[in-house]
Image (spheres, helix red, strand yellow):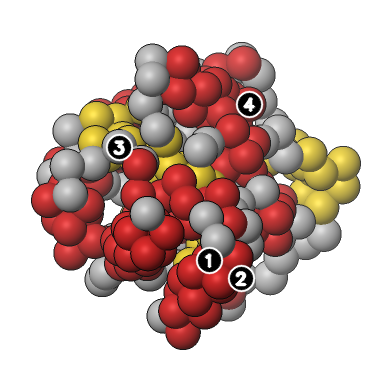
Amino acid sequence: ATPMSIMVGVGRGAQAGVLIRNAEALERMEKVDTLVIDKTGTLTEGKPKVVAIATASGFDEAELLRLAAGVERASEHPLAHAIVTAASDRSLDLAPVDGFEAPTGKGATGRVAGRSVVIGNVDYLASLGIDTAPLADIAEHHRADGATVVSVGIDGRFAGLIAIADPVKASTPDALRALAAEGLRVIMLTGDNRTTAQAVARKLGIADVEAEVLPDQKSAVVEKLRKQGRIVAMAGDGVNDAPALAAADVGIAMGTGTDVAMESAGITLLKGDLGGIVRARKLSQATMRNIR
Ligand code: ADP
Ligand code: MG
């Protein structure tokens, strides 16, 4: 492409909140036939809120939330923010955490007020010998509503669960409709639980879902699609999305997300509005038409 038409495209994009960092991204966007899209913070607002707490027998709801929030205060995960906010809404006093660790895509752990606390998904707790089965029915009920369920273990015992819901962005349904009309295949890619992911996908009319994908496997999904001959755009916001954004033909980061994601992407949507993907495609078509 000639530098002049690229510059015009980049300028028009910037006016619409679509920041194009490299010419290749603008050139390739019109050829994209597959959009891989992260759920949390990309399709959804990324501002999750605690909607329910259930305790296992012998545990108190306020105590569970207080200890869980004590650990999560040290985490930057959106789910962690939701838990800390719920605790401060209830004016619970949080004790400091010792020995904090947060294995990506799994959860967080540490010692709070002399107790050993773990929070995260079912597999993570299982790997520590904590069985979440006692509240499995309640957990599944919340997941079927599209909520994310995190389990809490205290001193090696299952203490209960916290259901957290993250509303879909207002701009998401229209953007997905426009992309479908362009003939793009849309695939949801998430580290979240399968039932939760499918509930959200169903609401949005997304048929393809890759759930329970660990951060280091997200880029493998993109690479597999490319090997199948697809031209892939990947949209995401998190640290865990960065390798997949870099592996895609076009990486699209949310301006509302992490810096690492933006540094790994050719395009950034300033306000995280997914309508920007449709706009980027139109700009790409117009730019390439000018050049041909
Ligand atoms: P996504 O791909 O949807 O952005 P992640 O890969 O960040 O999600 O996380 C996957 C799952 O790991 C979450 O749904 C949650 O169950 C668990 N998890 C990760 N970090 C935390 C945390 N700090 N606290 C509780 N659970 C967590
Ligand atoms: Mg995300």
Q: Is residue 252 visible?
A: no
Other residues around mark 2 within 10 Å, as few (<14) / some (14–19) / many (≥20): some
Residue that carries the numbered disc 2 in the rendered image: 92
Front of the two marks 3 and 2: 3
Is the CB atom of the residue marked by disc 1 within 8 angstroms of ligand 2's nearest atom? no
Give the image location of residue 259, x and y in percent.
Answer: 70, 61
Give the image location of residue 81, x and y in percent.
Answer: 58, 63
Residue sitting nearer the eye, 55 or 128? 128
Cα separation between marks 1 and 4 = 33 Å
- Residue 74 is left or right of residue 138, and the answer is right
Q: Is residue 262 visible?
A: yes
> Which residue appears farthest toward the bottom when viewing the image?
15
Q: Earlier in the sequence, mark 1 or mark 2?
A: 1
Residue that carries the numbered disc 4 in the rendered image: 216
Residue that carries the numbered disc 3 in the rendered image: 33
Which residue shows up at 68% across the image and 70% down it?
93
Quadrant into which the C terminus falls: bottom left
Front of the two marks 2 and 4: 4
Could you tell me which secondary element the residue under label 1 belongs to? helix
Other residues around mark 4 within 10 Å, as few (<14) / some (14–19) / many (≥20): some
Could you tell me which secondary element the residue under label 4 belongs to? helix
Q: Earlier in the sequence, mark 1 or mark 3?
A: 1
Residue 6 disc label: 1
Which residue shows up at 70% across the image and 33% down it?
103
Q: Earlier in the sequence, mark 3 or mark 4?
A: 3
Cα separation between marks 1 and 3 = 21 Å
